[in-house]
Image (cartoon, helix red, strand yellow):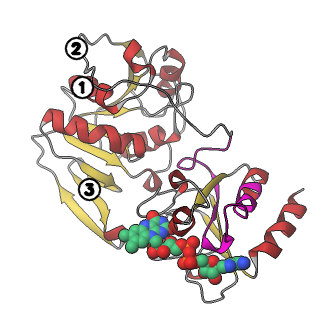
Amino acid sequence: MRCLIIAEHDGQNLNTATARAVAAASQLGVEAIDVAVLAHGGQALAEQAAILEGVSQVLLLDREENAHPLAAVLAPQIAALAEGYSHLFMPSTTFGKDVLPRVAALMGLPQISDLMTVKGPHHFERPVYAGNAIIELQCPPEQPVLATVRTASFKPVGTGDAAPIETRALEIDLPGHTRFVALEADAGDRPDLQSAERVVSGGRGLGSEENFRLVEQLADKLHAAVGASRAAVDAGYAPNDLQVGQTGKIIAPELYIALGISGAIQHLTGIKDAGTIVAINKDPDAPIFEVADLGLVGDLFEIVPQLLEKLD
Ligand SMILES: Cc1cc2nc3c(=O)[nH]c(=O)nc-3n(C[C@H](O)[C@H](O)[C@H](O)COP(=O)(O)OP(=O)(O)OC[C@H]3O[C@@H](n4cnc5c(N)ncnc54)[C@H](O)[C@@H]3O)c2cc1C
């Protein structure tokens, strides 16, 4: 049995989600864990993947078309690479959720989404109903297992000796119907929400887009990523890629600070695996206090400026 993991990166750095997928693979009891890096000019990325603990080999697919990761272009390459592997894992991030279903369709196989526990090489658990129920799955051993790995459920592996890197040239035609045009990304240098160690999130309690700056200020002081509740996103205080929760991002930072967030079940689903949860809310009965490790009952517009001052 061999497992192939598709690395996630921004062209320069490997996302920690890859190291978390390796952690899941190392619980399978497979003989080898290979990581495929699909990038153009990706030698430095391949070297980052090669030192992940437990990795046996890195396959580098250095093609012009891989300069920008497009699911439609990556999926046929991954399907071609997957031959001979018993398991194919990708992190359950926006990237993995975009790419792996296409790979599964090309291979004519089903996909397991959000794998959260490895009980055996073909025996897994995954959450359903916003994490309120867990289902156990048994997969037929005769066919490859394709799964997205719930990154919040696995701690990233450390680093060790470098595994060999092999550059692969896949002689396959790639679809031309989808092309990269431009990338519009937040120019800020805040950490990525899904892999950040600290996250400060704001909710409807912030009251306006202007007031939401308070969340950003606290995040910047703590070198944290910014998150938001769905109510804050729906009200236009924050962009929707910052939404945390059932229909947003599932995250597992070491520190999560919730400002003016009530703690609806759909929001809590996204922070179940956070280390320390701090909540600031003026309502002492807000459900967020049931899960918070530290809670401050009070007006965030008084507390946060004081916190900012102290952090100076
Ligand atoms: C299918 C479905 C999927 C959903 N997915 C998500 C999801 O992914 N993520 C998500 O977040 N929600 C999701 N929701 C919505 C969720 O049910 C809640 O409506 C939402 O999380 C509420 O956001 P909130 O806590 O910011 O707002 P509210 O529930 O309105 O809470 C605002 C809080 O701010 C506090 N507050 C107000 N003023 C102050 C102040 N000055 N100082 C301190 N505290 C103050 C209030 O006491 C209150 O507790 C989903 C709902 C459904 C039905």
Residue drawn 28% across the image and 20% down it: 176
Comes first in the chain, label 2 or label 3 = 3
**Horizontal relation, residue 232 to residue 151: left or right:** right
In the rendered image, the quadrant that contains the N terminus is top left
Crowding at label 3, few (<14), some or many (≥20) Cα neighbours within 10 Å? Answer: some
State the residue position of label 3. 124
| Residue at 34% across, 45% down | 97
Quadrant holding ligand 1?
bottom right
Q: Which disc number belongs to residue 183? A: none
Q: Position of residue 38 (x, y in %)?
A: 39, 23
Q: Give the labeled residue for mark 2.
A: 172
Q: Name the residue rendered at 38%, 48% in the picture.
A: 92
Residue 259 rendering spot, x and y as whole percentages: 67, 70
Total numbered labels placed on residues in the image: 3
Q: Quadrant of residue 84?
A: top left
Q: Residues within 10 Å of mark 1 (few under 14, many from 20)?
A: many
Quadrant (top left/top right/bottom left/bottom right) for the C terminus: bottom right
Residue 191 counted in the magenta span: yes
Name the element at disc 2: loop
Q: Going by the picture, which residue comes out furthest to the bottom?
A: 285
Could you give the CA–CA distance between mark 2 and mark 1, rounded to whole angstroms?
8 Å
Which sits in the foreground, 184 or 49?
Answer: 184
Tell me, yes or no, whether the two marked residues, 2 and 1, touch with CB atoms within 8 Å. yes
Q: Which residue is mark 1?
A: 76
Which of pointers 1 and 3 lies earlier in the amino acid sequence? 1
Give the alpha-carbon distance from disc 1 to disc 3, as whole Å: 26 Å
Residue 2 relative to residue 297: left or right: left
**Which dot, 1 or 3, sits closer to the camera?**
1
Magenta-span inclusion, residue 150: no
Give the amino acid at mark 1. Pro
> What segment is highlighted magenta in the picture?
189-217
Residue 157 appears in the picture as rendered: no
